């Protein structure tokens, strides 16, 4: 049982038993295993007298809802609080973890998936569900993870959260950080575009790390399939021109700018208003004959977003990225000077295990009088180290130059 596994891992556990859970397990057995009285009623006068439900919500360092039914997920996702568990969810400041347990069709139902997505956007983390044979005979996803797996997942999640909030030094409290992330899409016609393989993972990880370091974070993001990190403001854009405009509108209110986006250097000179049709061979009727040299696409240069930030009158501290396939350090050093950046973070994107789309990255940090190579590691952990490096260089710059804090 999960309560036993958590206690064996050293946790103090208070159990809240819902009406449906009491069909499967008794309050008496949970009390024996947890060593604490079990709570099930929002308005139980005796229990409220010893510890009110708001006090209980504040007592917890973490809330684990295991097993969580489809109905509980729906209530939590829509902010309804008809019982003690759902009331605690709304009242707690602690991180919340959900271990779903339900029939595979219920888990895969679009309504449940909508609720999962909403809860993740609200900052809830999911453990599982696992897949396999279910009590009803179905096979598929929906099984609750094993108690030992849940206890381990909870310990790992809490340790990572602690590392995130404590390891960034110096703090960025009171600082405004703007980050670009993801690819841009440059339209050719209403159905086609030019783009690249950026997933946004590195930029989003940096946004989360900057937020954890105390900064107010704005994420100007190209089209990606990622949820916005909690507490971060996201401005969604599609093209380089839109990204440029969104950045320019906010640059005067920015202390630190980090350009992680893989911005398209060029866009089609003219965007066709209708789908460009393929023309066969010699042409027929009103269709012209195919140009034997193929379809020509005329490209024009996009604005260099980061170079414009570096030249702005209210210049923030400017950090760029460089994605290189060869002469990695040489090109990056040159790019830092050419674009007038305070720092540049270079990744070798010829290595498919890092860089575009992967979960890991390895980066060399370059600034005017130093370089630091950081080995391959998960992008979220690397982001913590990168934000630490940026915060240190920024603090040093503030102390030695007349870099102005951003205006309100
Ligand atoms: O998104 P992921 O899948 O996690 O992958 C991460 C990444 C590989 C995209 C990221 O780590 C990275 O390297 N980002 C920069 C990609 C890039 O376009 O590099 P670049 O060397 O072409 O550009 C140099 C710098 O100029 C970058 O800061 C870029 O944001 C900026 N730039 C480039 C062109 C342009 N028109 N405007 C810009 O601001």
Image (cartoon, helix red, strand yellow):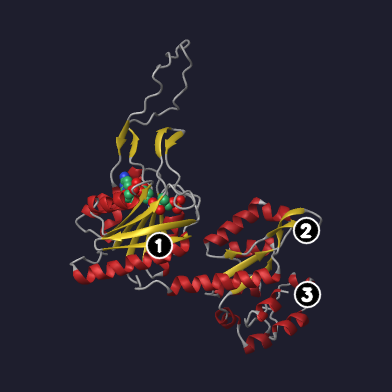
Earlier residue among tags 2 and 3: 3
Within 10 Å of disc 2 (Cα), the crowding (few <14, some 14-19, many 20+) is some
- Splitting the image into 4 quarters, where does residue 194 fall? top left
**Front-most of 315 and 262?**
262
Residue that label 3 marks: 25
- Which dot, 3 or 1, sits closer to the camera? 1
Residue that label 1 marks: 374
* Disc number for residue 103: none
Q: CA distance from mark 3 to mark 1?
A: 50 Å
Q: Is residue 175 visible?
A: no
At a point 65% along the width and 66% down the height, the residue shown is 99
Earlier residue among tags 1 and 2: 2
Pointer 2 residue Cβ closer than 8 Å to ligand 1: no
Within 10 Å of disc 1 (Cα), the crowding (few <14, some 14-19, many 20+) is some
Residue that label 2 marks: 134
- Which dot, 1 or 2, sits closer to the camera? 1
**Above-or-below relation of 69 to 223:** below
For mark 2, give the secondary structure. Answer: loop
At a point 37% along the width and 31% down the height, the residue shown is 271
């Amino acid at each position: 049982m999960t309560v036993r596994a958590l206690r064996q891992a050293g946790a103090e556990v208070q159990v809240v038993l819902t009406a449906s859970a009491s069909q499967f397990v008794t309050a008496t057995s949970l009390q024996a295993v947890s060593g604490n009285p079990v709570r099930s009623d929002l308005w139980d006068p005796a229990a409220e007298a010893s510890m009110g439900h708001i006090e209980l919500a504040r007592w917890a360092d973490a809330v684990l809802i295991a097993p969580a039914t489809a109905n509980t997920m729906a209530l939590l996702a829509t902010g309804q609080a008809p019982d003690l568990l759902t009331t605690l969810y709304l009242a707690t400041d602690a991180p919340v973890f959900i271990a779903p347990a339900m029939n595979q069709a219920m888990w895969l139902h679009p309504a449940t998936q909508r609720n999962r997505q909403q809860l993740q956007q609200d900052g809830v983390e999911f453990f599982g569900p696992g897949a396999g044979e279910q009590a009803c005979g179905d096979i598929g996803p929906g099984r609750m993870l094993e108690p030992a797996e849940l206890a381990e997942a909870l310990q790992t999640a809490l340790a990572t959260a602690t590392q995130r909030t404590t390891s960034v030094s110096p703090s960025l409290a009171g600082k405004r950080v703007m980050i670009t992330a993801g690819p841009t899409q440059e339209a050719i016609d209403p159905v086609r575009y030019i783009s690249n393989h950026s997933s946004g993972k590195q930029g989003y990880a940096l946004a989360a790390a900057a937020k954890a370091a105390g900064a107010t974070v704005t994420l100007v993001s190209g089209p990606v399939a990622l949820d916005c990190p909690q507490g971060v403001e996201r401005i969604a854009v599609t093209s380089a021109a839109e990204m440029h405009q969104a950045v320019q509108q906010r640059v005067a209110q920015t202390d630190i700018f980090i350009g992680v986006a893989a911005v398209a250097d060029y866009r089609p000179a003219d965007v066709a208003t209708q789908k460009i049709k393929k023309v066969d061979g010699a042409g027929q009727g009103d269709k012209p004959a195919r140009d034997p040299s193929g379809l020509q696409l005329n490209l024009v240069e996009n604005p260099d977003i980061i170079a414009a930030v570096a030249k702005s009158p209210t210049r923030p501290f400017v950090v760029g990225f460089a994605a290189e396939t060869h002469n990695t350090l040489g090109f990056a050093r040159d790019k830092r000077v050419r674009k007038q950046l305070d720092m540049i973070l270079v990744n070798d994107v010829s290595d498919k295990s890092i860089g575009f789309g992967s979960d890991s990255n390895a980066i060399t940090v370059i600034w005017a009088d130093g370089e630091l190579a950081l080995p391959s590691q998960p992008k979220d952990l690397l982001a913590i180290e990168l934000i630490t490096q940026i915060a240190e260089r920024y603090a040093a710059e503030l102390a030695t130059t007349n870099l102005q804090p951003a205006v309100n």
